[in-house]
Image: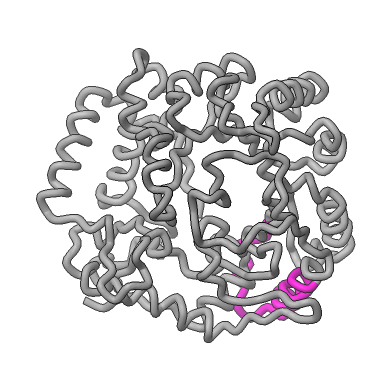
Amino acid sequence: MDFYKATHNDILYHLQNLRHLVFEVTDQCNLDCRYCAYSELYRGYDARKGKNMSFIKAKLIMDYLCDLWKGGGYSDGSNNELTISFYGGEPLMNFRFIQQVIDYVENLGLEKIGKICSYSMTTNAVLINQYMDYLVEKDFRLLISLDGDEFAQSYRRDHLGNNSFDRVFKNIKLLQDKYPEYFENKISFNSVLHNRNEIESIHQFIRTQFAKIPRISPLSEVGICKEKKHEFISIYRNPTESFYRSGNCEFIESEMLMRTPRTAQLADYILHQGANDYYTYNDLYINKDELPLSTGTCVPFFKKMFVTVNGKILPCERISQQFSVGQVHEDRVELNENYVVDRHNYYISKYANQCINCVSNRVCMQCVYFIDDICKDDTRCPSFLTKNDLERRNEDTFKFLEEHPHYYKRILEEVKITV
């Protein structure tokens, strides 16, 4: 079986059809969350030095992309929406940068080349009371970090060790009261699961207080410092175990749907093993068994481009910054498509022999950049499945479907797959 390798043209295509540009606005934060991905628990990121991204670098990367978009050649015209996101640290600590970027974008004339821009941000809401009018004016989609009630929020502390709950809760309520329609349509919540909360308590609190169904994220198990492993284990909460500890599993599952373990596994089966999944009409004419194998790793810039506060260019904000593929300098953008594709193919090819023998090789979801030992010669994929592994997983899925047949229709009708 052939193994898929990205090409120079793939990179150009995804750059010209870029959907999502993410700026790391600042590496400063007004909180000192114990489990933060940039805390001492983890490795794989540049030292945090209280640095703000310069507008010059943002302008350079925007001009670089605009030149590509205007040049055409690889654009298929199917994507005209570009989301520009602001990430941190806490992005509102460099609010002036956000204003400068939006002012510049709105004067670029992107609508003349068919680009429609929208804005989004991930925020801890500590400063949202100061800037909510602007965020509403620019119709931002906001993802607010809140772990639940006061005790659940206690890992999200300020630099003096104080729980951020009272201030954050007050600010969110202020936004909800002042702009109820905006709040209903544009606000979502992300809660980190840990040893001071549970899926049930998070769901109940966010739903009761804000009429929202939160995303619930476990602590990342990628890039943990060896010397901090014990501390990580002490605060980690397994999401599947937490879900089953709930006294109201059926209700939570019905409301959260794809955000619970069993329904997510069922949806994965329907999408990838049901033999009826087609992303485009052209797929109807393709024999999938003849396609080359691939991991679940996105080709660079297929989903987004991430620019760090230090100007590093990465395919995603979730992966280690050691995998940067380019650099925004103070006077130019350094991004060589051949280097990008060669580096990507090098890491992907490490798993080629394992993929050939894996029964899920046609439906792989494993991003290789989330494999801790990726830089080793003998690296092993943690998602490798044998035939018996897959059969056991499918047996569990079928049993769940027999007990909850209505979820089949709900998943088909309500779940939207985005790429």
Q: Position of residue 45 (x, y in %)?
A: 56, 61
Residue 349 sits in which quadrant? Answer: bottom left
Number of numbered discs visible in the structure rendering:
0
* 415 vs 361: above or below: above
Residue 142 place in picture, x, y as percent = 69, 39
Q: Is residue 91 above or below residue 177?
A: below
Say which of 153 and 382 sits in front. 153
Magenta extent: 60-82
Along the horizontal axis of the image, is 167 left or right of 6? right
The residue positioned farthest toward the left in the image shown? 388
- Which residue lies at the image location 53% right of the left edge and 50% below the top edge? 40
Residue 400 falls in image quadrant = top left
Residue sitting at 48 percent across and 80 percent down? 341
- Report if residue 268 is visible in the image: yes
- Structure colour scheme: one colour
Q: Is residue 186 visible?
A: no
Q: Residue at x 23, y 58 (%)?
A: 384
Q: Is residue 307 magenta?
A: no
Which residue is located at x 87 percent, y 57 percent? 100
Q: Quarter of the image holding residue 75?
A: bottom right
Query: Along the line of sight, which residue is nearer the eye, 105 or 288?
Result: 105
**Left or right: where 286 falls relative to 132:** left
Where is residue 72? Give x, y as percent: 68, 78
> Left or right: where does residue 120 sit relative to residue 346?
right
Where residue 99 appears, as percent x and y from the top left, is 86, 52
| Above-or-below relation of 138 to 104 | above
| Rendered-image quadrant of the N terminus | bottom left
Asked if the stretch drawn in magenta spans residue 81, the answer is yes
